[in-house]
Image (cartoon, rainbow, N blue to C red):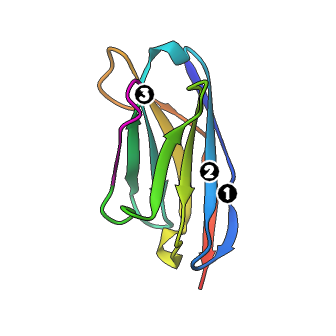
Amino acid sequence: QVQLVESGGGLVQAGDSLRLSCAASGRTYSITAMAWFRQAPGKERDLVGAIIWSSGSAQYADSVKGRFTISRGIAKSTVYLQMSSLKPEDTAVYYCAALLRGESSYDYWGQGTQVTVSS
């Protein structure tokens, strides 16, 4: 099992930056990838981006490419989502999720953290 706890959400203005953190505990040695998802009110949960645990290589949704950066901590038990040039449409609950070795889907999720961007 892996436990995930997000932090860092809040209320910001358009154009501001914000960094979210996701701390993993438990079977972190089994993590092969971590991802950030977001869900806006009335909408489906969408993938923001993901990072390969071993290489640190990350990929992003087109909507955030060039504005958001995913990175991992030195101890590799924390993943970050650095968000810049925030827009009102980035308002959502942001979730981190973990993919474990031998599994084919993100089965471990944090509780989510609210990000609200005012215009």
Where is residue 41 drawn, in percent x and y? 51, 67
Name the outermost residue toward the bottom: 119
The residue stretch that appears in magenta? 54-60
Which residue position is annotated with label 2? 20
- The answer to whether the residues at label 1 and label 2 have Cβ atoms under 8 Å apart is yes
Q: Are marks 3 and 2 in contact (CB under 8 Å)?
A: no
Mark 1 Cα within 10 Å, few/some/many (few <14, many 20+)?
Answer: some
Q: Amino acid at mark 1?
A: Gly
Write the residue at 57% across / 44% down.
80
According to the picture, the residue beneath numbered tag 1 turns out to be 9
> Taking 90 as reference, is 101 above or below it?
above
Q: Which residue is mark 3?
A: 53
Q: Earlier in the sequence, mark 3 or mark 2?
A: 2
Report, in whole angstroms, how far the alpha carbon at label 3 lies from the one at label 2: 17 Å
Q: Looking at the image, is 67 positioned above or below residue 32?
A: below
Instruction: Estimate the spatial distance between the alpha carbons at disc 1 and disc 2, rounded to whole Å.
Output: 6 Å
Label 1: element kind? loop
Which mark lies nearer to you, 3 or 1? 3
Of callouts 1 and 2, the N-terminal one: 1
Which sits in the foreground, 46 or 12?
12
Left or right: residue 39 versus residue 76 is left
Q: Locate residue 74, reporting x and y percent.
A: 59, 29
Residue at point 37% right, 51% down? 47
Q: Quadrant of the C terminus?
A: bottom right
Where 26 falls versus 9 (above or below)? above
Instruction: Report the front residue among 71 and 106.
Output: 71
